[in-house]
Image (cartoon, coloured by chain):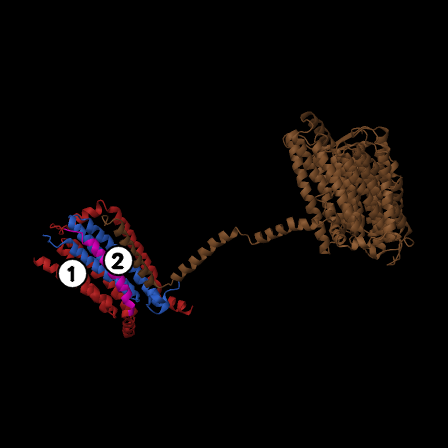
Amino acid sequence: MLEITLFYIAATIALVATVLAMTRANAIHALIYLIVSLLAVAVIFFLIGAPFAAALEIVIYAGAIMVLFVFVIMMLNLGEKGDQQERHWLQPKIWIGPALLVTLLFIELLYVIARVEGPVSVTSVSAKEVGLSLFGPYVLAVEIASMLLLAGLVGSFHLGRRYLDRDGIEKEGEQ
Amino acid sequence: MEGLNVPLNHILLVSSLLFAIGMLGLMIRRNIIFILMSLEVMLNSAALAFVAAGAHWGQPDGQVVFMLILTVAAAEVAVGLGLVLQVQKRFKTLDMDHANRMRG
Amino acid sequence: MLELIWLIPLIPLCSSLLLMLTAGRLPRLLIGYLGVGSVGIAALLTLAAGIHFMANPEPFELTLWTWMQVGNFAPGVAFYFDGLTLVMMSVITGVGFLIHLFSTEFMEKDTSYARYFAYLNMFVAAMLILVMADNLLLLYLGWEGVGVCSYLLVGFWYQNSANGQSARKAFIVTRIGDTAMALGLFLLFTELGTLDIQGMVAMANETWQVGDSIPLIACLLLLGGAVGKSAQLPLHTWLPDAMAGPTPVSALIHAATMVTAGVYLIARTHGLFLLAPTAMMVVAIIGIATSLMAAFTALMQSDIKRILAYSTISQIGYMFLALGVGAWTAGIFHLMTHAFFKALLFLGSGAIIHCLHHEHNIFKMGGLRRKMPVTFWSFMIGSAALAALPMTSGFFSKDQILLEAYQLPGMGPWLWLGGLLGALLTAIYSFRLVFVVFFGKANTEPDRDTGWRMAVPLTVLCALSLIGGYFIIPVEAVFPAASGEHPAHWVEYVSISVPLIGLLLAYLIFHSRQLRVDGLVGSRVGQLLRRFWFSGWGIDWLYDRLFVRPYYELSGMLKSEPVDVIYGLIVAINQTLNQWLSEAQTGRMRWYIASMVFGLVVLISLALQISPEVL
């Protein structure tokens, strides 16, 4: 019973944190809320018997990926002017249309989900099973994922290098 | 550890709500950093659905797909943030509506 | 000796090529010598060949080389020389030489002197190939060659667009006939497997019976070609307009030689026509109808050259009549005498036009008798021969045609009556011309008289027109013998007297003015007929309405390519769609995402509608 209560609390936190993250004007604030949301999702993972996924969610998502965001935001140094600009952009006339569309989509999803029944399994899936499965039938997917990561590495290096190269900025700025 | 009797459709409900919020954020924000964050939210909601479905069947496949989503998210964020730097350098703004040179 | 006849067309051809390639850079005197001399040499060679042939009158074949070899079809460049060929060649080179000589004076002021002789020599060469050809394909080559030369020479003064129009008209109208003829050649080749004229006629006689349908169709198709080239009904409209060319050209091409090519074609293939009596009847009827129609028209014209043009059409009608009734020899004989006297008349009119500053209207001439005596006598003799006054050349040939027409069983007397009416009209219009132009009071002053280069051809042609009737043409071996019967004497007397009556009428009306026709002409019916005949029986008008205008309208419609509209529509639709879609390419990513979400919503609702159990 405690676990179920914990689940609903975690779910509520996740949803509220996400909504706040989406509506903040300041990027760092939004990011903090997003991390909170991710941590809440990690709790849900843990509660439904996926401890390995929960650990990865915290380490990689909330840790590594979000840190990347933080670095970039700090690098850009948007400041107070950026916040005002964001607030100006977030007016009801801008978000009312998309909100309607998304509501429609959500109602449709709800309609589909409504027919799913039954509880989540009682047994948890251990890290060992996941590992066996990863390097068993999914080994090709792992290889492809590693390729993807390599491509991401090369791509981000290529894109980011010019920015760090001061001379490059000035040259291109003159153009 | 024991699993628990959360109804599956409640988890899926949470997942769809997250997805919808992410998508809303995608549509209403003009700042490219917020767009990337919205994408993260959407990916995360998909991952939640996968893990929940895997737990429902007692199979590891859900978590495997979660890890694949994780790699996709990592790669996407790396490239996406690189692009953010470029956009900032070229347009001196993060407003995506300024980066519309490819209009037809 | 006869082995050398290939030189006869070759020499004018070489001269023509030389004149073309030098493009008028030669001195004028040399151009004249080349142009006239080449035809003169050809005439001398023809004379020599004729003498040789008279001594030994055997048909002679000369194959130079095989033109092409396609399966079992191997037409040769081969010449066939017999009495008919000799007559035609003599006319072409002899009259041709005189006209060339005349031209040197007529065209002496013209800037395109060399071009003129190049065309004229090429014409002579093509015409010689036409009459000497051993097979119908080579004949067709010559046939088209003279057509091209006719086109080039009618439009010789191309700076005036009306002349170009006349040239095109001549070319296109004859092309209709040529197409029929080409079809006839195809038919004959598919049926008989050869186009060699002698072999083909022999084979046709073995294959078909008299009255079969295939020779009838073939003959009618060949007749179509002949009708086009010889300006007979219904394809005669080009000839009066062809008078836009220089007058010696009209004399050579549109009176003496090319327009008689149709007559030659029918005479040459008479073996085929004998198999199709219906076709012969058609030939005769076309001949007499054309003859009368043109005679009435000639009566009303005021342009000297148009009078002569309609008279030519009318006289060729007589030749067709002769061919139609089987009077082959008489037809060819009339062809020859007509070449003499019509060339004479045309050259005479050329002399008048030359000396009167290109004046064509006969009512602006008058009283030229004393000032241009050579021309006057030329016209007197020419008109007498044209009207077939007794003892002139035209008399012998026309009389023979009328007598043989009379003897044709069935329609004979009617054809004869028609021919008599035509003869009467011929006499009236030819002497109307003489009286109006040479008698009465002078309206214009000629600035000169003819020089010797004009006078000599006129004199020689005068002599030929007078004594031409006593020639005996060596064609008895070519054509089947005439029946030899003579009709009753009164028929002959009537035939002789009709032209004299015509002369008398012309004298009374146009010279002494004793016979007043003003009332007749002035009446409403008279006016109407007058206008009707003047316009050539309204045939030009009719063709204009029937063919020319619908054709222009059709091409006007097709100019905008109506079928292309369909494709244009497709392009327009695509372009519009493209415009709409590129409007959608705002470059705003949020719009893209919003539309993707919208599509997603629609898709999911569709999927739920169609198969809810899948989801």
Judge whether B37 appears above or below C101 on screen.
below
Assign a secondary structure to mark 1. Answer: helix
Q: Relative to residue C561, is residue A55 drawn left or right?
A: left
**Residue A52 pos. (x, y %):** 16, 54
Name the amino acid type tagged 2. Answer: Ala
**Residue C3 pos. (x, y %):** 80, 32
Name the amino acid type tagged 1. Answer: Ala
Q: Colour of chain A?
A: red
Residue B93 sits in quarter? bottom left
Verify whether residue A115 appears in magenta: yes
Judging by colour alone, the chain drawn in blue in this rendered image is: B
Whole-number angstrom distance, CA of label 1 to CA of label 2? 24 Å
Report which residue position mark 1 lands on.
Answer: A11
Mark 1 is surrounded, within 10 Å at the Cα level, by few (under 14), some (14 to 19) or many (20 or more) other residues, namely: many
Judging by colour alone, the chain drawn in brown in this rendered image is: C
Q: Chain of mark 2?
A: B
Verify whether residue A102 appears in magenta: yes
Q: Chain of mark 1?
A: A
- Which residue range is magenta in the image? A93-117
**Residue C432 pos. (x, y %):** 84, 50
Q: Is residue B43 something that shows in the picture?
A: yes
The residue lying toward the viewer, choosing from C359 and C577, is: C359
Report which residue position mark 2 lands on.
Answer: B74
Number of callouts in the render? 2
